[in-house]
Image (tube, helix red, strand yellow):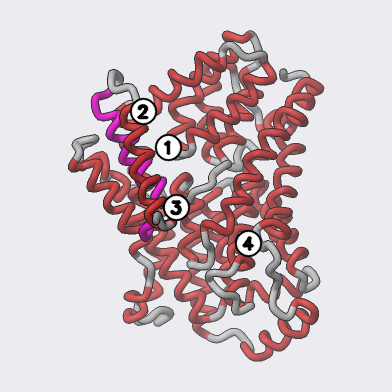
């Protein structure tokens, strides 16, 4: 009799084999092997057959042993900023947890907005909208809001495996990322798209981008809030929710006034964020400055984090991050991105304008399963413009829909900043997949039912 575990193993092996024989090898002889290896890892992650970190390590070994790409390509992400930024985030997260600083900040936030779960989630998203307007660095926003959400689950003593803890961490993540697509300066992807499109279709102004995208983005943010309030938590509620204000006051009293260590940690955080934001003034990579400042928590002069605490950090998660980034690096090396574009683009050219815009959204959402958003923007922006011109329509709506698709993901490996949220240890993938799938579907419906008529109304489609 087949057990569920055996069935999952059979699926995890059958899908890669089927993909291996289905993929065209004429573009690159290692293309079938790349998709087979990648499909195996993705399937195992999705079915939770094995721990994510060993699977991630095995995937990089498969790429090298199978000669899909040279080792220098597979392991190139180790030289990028993200692994070291995550290491600093783990150190700072450990310090924030042990000093109680984020607990204090989160409890103060809840009191400020009325000490209810729903009001807290709405307040985080409203603050995220304001921050997206003022602070163009999406990574910095993710660091700030995930830290606040992490402090909230710690302050309320929530279990790491609970649905409500996953909902709160995702609320912090959504607050940092969802508002970004309402502003041209809200995400790196929008800026890269504009820079690629400008030589062909002319500049995209900040006001024009906001006029075209901000109204729908407000609905998108509201939907993200609804997912965190109603869908992801399921039937779970905050403990002692009926008298939460009293509980919060009591816990703040138990914490007492801010300690010297908390003040020092707050100073380190401020310096780290300033270093991240002032790259153009000091000339050093801001993300590496942030990472270096974060590691100063171990210095004896500060004495914020204890060296012996380092062994308890989930540093293995960095292997998972690097392996996921390696998927995009290998895909670009063998030309998988261009091959996928060659399959999709001829189909899109046969569609009417409104459906071609929806197809642009679906394409980017689908490509996210293989490429990182930055890789997708770099490889598919120009072809999207070509299709729009062939259809005789303004390329901007197609590009805007394409950008919305880049913010759709289900599995952690699809987006580096999404993976960052998992460093808290208080988010479980299976709790949020349903909500993310719903957001992906309803965003597509919203584009065809709301955005397309709106773009026609303002005259850009």
Could you tell me how far apart the alpha carbons at marks 1 and 4 are, in whole angstroms?
26 Å
329 w.r.t. 121: above or below? above
* Tag 1–tag 4 contact (CB < 8 Å): no
- Residue 64 on image: x %, y %: 20, 42
344 left or right of 10 in image = right
- Whether residue 327 is visible to the viewer of this picture, yes or no, is no
Q: Residues within 10 Å of mark 3 (few under 14, many from 20)?
A: some
> Which of the 4 image quarters holds residue 74?
top left
Q: Quadrant of the C terminus?
A: top right
Q: Is residue 14 left or right of residue 146?
A: left
Pick the front one: 261 or 331: 331
Element carrying mark 2: helix
Quadrant of image for the N terminus: bottom left
Tell me which label, 3 or 4, sits earlier in the chain: 3
Residue tagged by mark 1?
A: 370
- Residue drawn where x is 49% and y is 19% of the image: 383
Q: Give me the disc on residue 336.
A: 2
Identify the secondary structure beneath mark 4.
helix
Magenta segment boundaries in residue numbering: 28-52
Disc 4/disc 2 C-alpha distance (Å): 34 Å
State which tag comes first along the sequence, 4 or 2. Answer: 4
Residue 301 image position (x, y, % from top left):
37, 81
Q: Which residue is mark 3?
A: 47
2 or 1: tag closer to the N-terminus: 2
| Disc marking residue 263 | none
**Identity of the residue drawn at 38% across and 63% down:** 87
Percent from the top left, x then y, of residue 438? 65, 45
Q: Is residue 227 magenta?
A: no
Q: Secondary structure at mark 3?
A: helix
Q: Which mark is residue 167?
A: 4
């Amino acid at each position: 009799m087949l057990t569920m575990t055996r069935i999952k193993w059979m699926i995890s092996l059958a899908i890669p084999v089927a993909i291996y024989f289905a993929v065209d090898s004429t573009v690159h002889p290692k293309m079938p092997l790349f998709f087979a290896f990648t499909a195996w890892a993705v399937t195992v992650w999705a079915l939770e057959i094995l721990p994510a970190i060993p699977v991630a390590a095995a995937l990089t070994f498969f790429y090298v042993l199978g000669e899909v790409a040279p080792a220098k390509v597979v392991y190139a992400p180790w030289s990028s900023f993200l692994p070291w930024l995550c290491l600093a985030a783990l150190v700072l997260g450990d310090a924030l947890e042990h000093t109680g600083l984020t607990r204090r900040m989160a409890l103060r936030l809840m009191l400020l907005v009325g000490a209810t779960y729903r009001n807290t989630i709405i307040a985080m998203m409203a603050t995220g909208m304001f921050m997206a307007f003022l602070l163009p660095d999406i990574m910095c926003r993710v660091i700030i809001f995930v830290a606040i959400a992490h402090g909230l689950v710690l302050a309320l003593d929530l279990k790491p495996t609970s649905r409500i803890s996953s909902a709160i961490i995702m609320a912090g993540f959504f607050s940092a990322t969802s508002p970004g697509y309402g502003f041209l300066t809200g995400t790196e992807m929008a800026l890269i798209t504009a820079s690629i499109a400008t030589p062909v279709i002319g500049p995209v102004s900040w006001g024009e981008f906001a006029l075209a995208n901000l109204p729908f983005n407000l609905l998108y943010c509201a939907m993200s809030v609804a997912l965190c309030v109603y869908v992801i938590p399921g039937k779970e509620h905050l403990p002692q929710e009926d008298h939460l204000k009293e509980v919060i006051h009591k816990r703040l009293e138990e914490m007492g006034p801010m300690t010297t260590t908390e003040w020092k940690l707050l100073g380190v955080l401020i310096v780290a964020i300033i270093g991240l934001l002032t790259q153009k003034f000091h000339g050093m990579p801001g993300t590496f400055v942030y990472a270096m400042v974060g590691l100063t928590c171990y210095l004896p002069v500060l004495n914020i984090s204890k060296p012996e605490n380092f062994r308890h950090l989930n540093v293995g998660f960095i292997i998972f991050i690097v392996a996921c980034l390696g998927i995009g690096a290998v895909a670009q090396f063998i030309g998988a991105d261009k091959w996928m574009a060659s399959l999709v683009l001829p189909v899109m050219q046969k569609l009417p304008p409104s459906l071609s815009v929806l197809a642009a959204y679906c394409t980017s959402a689908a490509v996210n399963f293989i490429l990182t958003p930055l890789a997708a923007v770099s490889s598919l922006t120009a072809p999207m413009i070509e299709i729009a011109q062939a259809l005789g329509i303004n390329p901007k709506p197609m590009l805007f829909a394409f950008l919305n698709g880049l913010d759709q993901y289900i599995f952690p490996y699809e987006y580096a900043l999404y993976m960052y949220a998992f460093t808290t240890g208080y988010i479980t993938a299976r709790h949020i997949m349903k909500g993310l799938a719903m957001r992906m579907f309803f965003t597509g419906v919203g584009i065809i039912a709301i955005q397309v008529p709106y773009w026609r109304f303002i005259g850009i489609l």
